[in-house]
Amino acid sequence: SQKIEQNSEALNIQEGKTATLTCNYTNYSPAYLQWYRQDPGRGPVFLLLIRENEKEKRKERLKVTFDTTLKQSLFHITASQPADSATYLCALDSGNQGGKLIFGQGTELSVKP
Amino acid sequence: EAGVAQSPRYKIIEKRQSVAFWCNPISGHATLYWYQQILGQGPKLLIQFQNNGVVDDSQLPKDRFSAERLKGVDSTLKIQPAKLEDSAVYLCASSLDSGGNTDTQYFGPGTRLTVL
């Protein structure tokens, strides 16, 4: 069955550094992948979508890569700020019509001043 | 633009009791999703509606969970009877179009359910 793995341990970094989060998947080939941010007590908020034929996507300080050979996506936040502290979720399309997403368990990022 | 609204925000019940959650999606959004998020895990899709029809309910425990979306707008999710393992945050999301594969999903704040 489809399986998605994100860094289970929290990531702690210093303000100004680049945060890199990993999303690995097995047993299928998604057509696209999305990244969401979730703050405590709130629902996830969409950040970026990348398709299988795209190697890289950028939005302001965010960059996502999608390597279909390695079955991995990397999510980068450059010049990180304490306000970037949150849990980041990757989600892959299930391969079925209708937009059903399968979410990873999320990685908690903490940016220290 | 108003976001996805959910109520209540918190609910505490005893096991074997019933509970219902309500969701009002963003105006004009055709597709509505209910997710269950257990602490430390990502959201898991329970049911997806397009307008008032069910697109996917393959992971909905139908012996105790039910959901409806009357008139293709608001939706309710019910659990009857609740079990301890139902303790989770129940998230509602909506998307604009027909649930196409790249539609952005907009999430509500969720309802945190505790079953004692």
Image (spheres, helix red, strand yellow):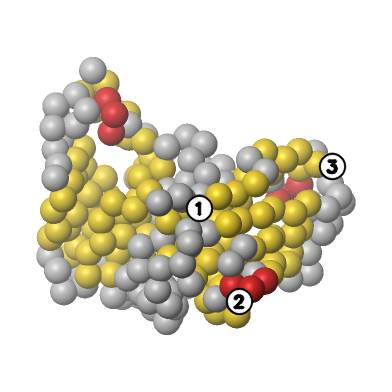
Viewer-side label of 3, 2: 2
N-term mark: 1 or 2: 1
Which residue lies under the disc numbered 3? B14
In the foreground, B33 or A4: B33
- Give the Cα separation between the discs numbered 1 and 3: 28 Å
Q: Residue B4, which numbered label?
A: 1
Residue B102 position in % (x across, y down): 32, 70
Residue A60 locus on image (x, y percent): 14, 45
Work out whether disc 1 and disc 3 sit on a shared chain.
yes
Q: Amino acid at mark 1?
A: Val
Q: Secondary structure at mark 3?
A: loop
* Image quadrant in which the C terminus of chain B is located: top right
| Tag 2 residue | B52
Q: Is residue B38 visible?
A: no
Chain label for disc 2:
B
At label 3, the amino acid type is Glu
Is A39 left or right of B41, judged from the image as shown? left
Say if B6 sits above or below A71 in the image.
above
Marks 3 and 2, the one that precedes in the sequence: 3
